Amino acid sequence: MAETSSREMINEIRGTRMVPGTCIICPWHCATEVFVRDDKVVYVRGNEHSANGTSRCVKGIASAHLSRDPDRLLHPMRKNSSGGFDRISWDEALSYIAEKLLSIREKDGPEVVGYFWHLDSNPMFSMQLFTHLYGTPNWSGHGAACDQDRRLASEAMFGHPLPTKDFAHSRFIMLWGVDPFGANEALHENRELMEALKRGAKLVVVDPVRSRTAERAHVWLPVRPGTDGALALAMAHRIVETQAYDQEFCEGWLYGFQEFADHVLAQGYTPEWAEGVTGIDQQTITQLADEFAATRPALMDGLKGLVNYSNGLDAFRTIYTLNAMTGNIDGPGNIILKEPAPLDMPIEIPEEEVAVPQRPSLSEAMGYPLAPDIPTQLLPWAVIEHQPYPVKAAFFHIINPAMSEPNSRVFEQMMEALELSVTIDLYMTETAQLSDIVLPEASMFERAEVREGLWSGPQVICSQPAVSPLGESRPVYEIMKGLAEKLGYGEYFQWDSWEDWARRMTQYLPISFEELKEKGCWQGDLNYYKYGEEGFGTGSGRIEVYSESLNEAGYDPLPVYTEAERVLPDDEYPFQLINGKMQFHCNVHTQNNPYLLEIEDENWAELNPQDAQALGISDGDRIEIASPQDKAVIAVRLREAVQPGVVKVIHGHGFGRRFGSMARGKGTHINPIFETRVNPISGGIGYNECKVSIGKSEEA
């Protein structure tokens, strides 16, 4: 007798049918199983065939509300002369957009149009339409507000955009400015990290705040904000000085290692020097450097706590160099250079029909030729002042820069100056409210997806529509198909069903499309030491600790430590503001969710009790945080885990919403107090480079 699967058991108990899905609440995009009854989502869990297994985070479990939220966008909308919105048909909306796009291209060229996306639902359709056919080079993800420095550091050194982490086999793990147990996003990595700790792996966390992950660590290093690069360089100095590096690996696979070694010694990046910069005593630095170099396998990595500073790129370059000089690259228990799955593009465009832009991308024209994504903090100047060249139209797909970008006022001015602004989203977000046209996208439960997963090996997630779209909402692939027809490119966007383009995308997988549809996920083998056959994707074929790509672009080929002098606290603004993610919210799509709001319905600031006492502030008070740019009022929670002189604001990528019957008005929008600050090489946003004053607010 055949064994009954858990999917079948759930279907029998709940009277449901299971449809493979994918979760796009956060950027990790876990493969899911969606259980449906009477065209309604009843239950969602992880996909049993994927790396995350059947587990889900609380955000994912609560996500079923998206499929039935009455506050969702239901119809295309167009802004009227009084600033409100009128309902229009899809034909009217797409005709208006196409007419504007054709007129703008005729007058100014295709490069003056930008397409920006975040939670990338099927982004390849917009990429093929806007870059390959219409002709703009300005199609960009949200990297400037997220992992820009990490990605550029990896591309410059490894020729690879996305290192992952093999916690499962590691014996020494050092995490810099990242809180996986707090944000709770990469579930398979979190589970592996927990299992590694149970097996005796050592965990070291570098963070100005004792985060949830730091609470589980064997060693917590409460580094001064923005000084991670100094700590990493000091560890490198110790390993070079004691010759504890992997000599054979360095000689065979590191390009410019001797230059790096001479550099850290000549610059005097000693543990003693780093103690004065970071606040971490030199004995601890020395001990951890020795232990990291002696323990195999090991890994170190980081994220938001580094990339939100102007010196984050070089901090990451040094951290990746520490992995490389000890031979901890792409092996069991190391950082892994993820192997991509063999996916094709969804539509075929003849090479001779692919448009060739006549202007460089905005990144290159702005002076950021190596930036993985457009430095969006500088976009308003392209629109308002036509620097470096004009931008006349912008599309915003599941991205809400009116809330997530610093210096919000200048963004609002930018929106007024655009000739065409279009938002594609599930809600009437703050950016949508500033747009000319708003298009309702179908939710992740109402559309198909074929995408690369974020597991370390090759992984493809294939989801399919589980319930009917709400109102007139459409999947973005149907939106792009309709727009392509209006623009004269309809011949390339021909399919009768989503399976047609999905079959093309997955034609090179080693399993049939029918099997992929049934399982919802395919994973190949996790192969180690791939560089042994392929080399690295750099010009030299080796790990470039001396970066030729940076050198050719006019930047320092070796990492250095610099301080952001302009934003250090002073007498008038004595506190350093840093930011953090929420465990129960992520971006736009959680904050109108009644289940998640029941857990946390606003964001807050965290302050050391010592500082609070000096200011007459009690736990739960509302405080005013003021920067040279602006001020905001927010609730405060007192935590010993926060260093004196530091205030941490939990923002959840924006609170204080102006949409949604449940989200509207809850919490505080903190980003207006940030000035425009970008990394001088990557273009990443310096969210943490903000000095502030704090006082008890008189607001209730």
Image (tube, rainbow, N blue to C red):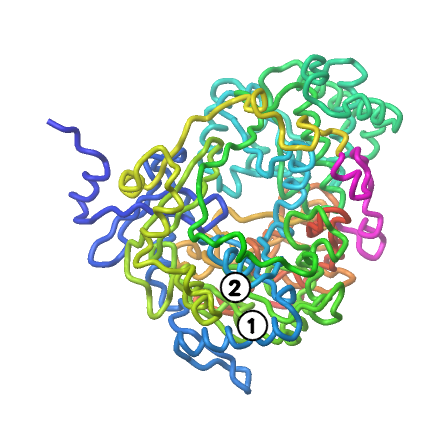
> Which class describes the residues within 10 Å of circle 1: few (<14), some (14-19), or many (20+)?
many
Image coords of residue 268 (percent x, y): 87, 26
Magenta stretch containing residue 607, yes or no?
A: no
Determine whether 490 is above or below 620 in the image.
below
Query: Which numbered disc, 2 or 1, marks the residue that appears first in the sequence?
Result: 1
Residue 613 visible in this rendered orientation of the protein: no
Magenta stretch, residue numbers? 548-576
Which label sits on residue 101? Answer: 1
In the image, what residue type sits under mark 2? Answer: Lys
Of 280 and 44, which appears nearest the observer?
44
The quadrant the C terminus occupies is: bottom right
**Image point 71% across, 18% down: which residue?**
250
- Which secondary structure type mostly characterizes the magenta part of the structure? loop
- Does the image show residue 583? yes
x 62%, y 21%: residue = 328
Residue 627 in picture, x, y percent from top left: 75, 60
Query: Residue 255: where, in percent of width, then height?
Result: 74, 25
User: Which of the numbered marks, if any, corresponds to residue 281?
Assistant: none
Marks 2 and 1, how far apart in space? 37 Å
Determine whether, in the image, residue 574 is placed left or right of residue 160.
Answer: right
Residue at the disc numbered 2: 666
Q: Is residue 614 left or right of residue 374?
A: right
Residue 452 image offset from top left, x and y in percent: 45, 42
Q: Quadrant of residue 157?
A: top right
Q: Disc 1 on helix, strand or loop?
A: helix
User: Split into 4 quadrants, where in the image is the N terminus?
Assistant: top left
Q: Amino acid at mark 1?
A: Leu
Number of marks in the image? 2
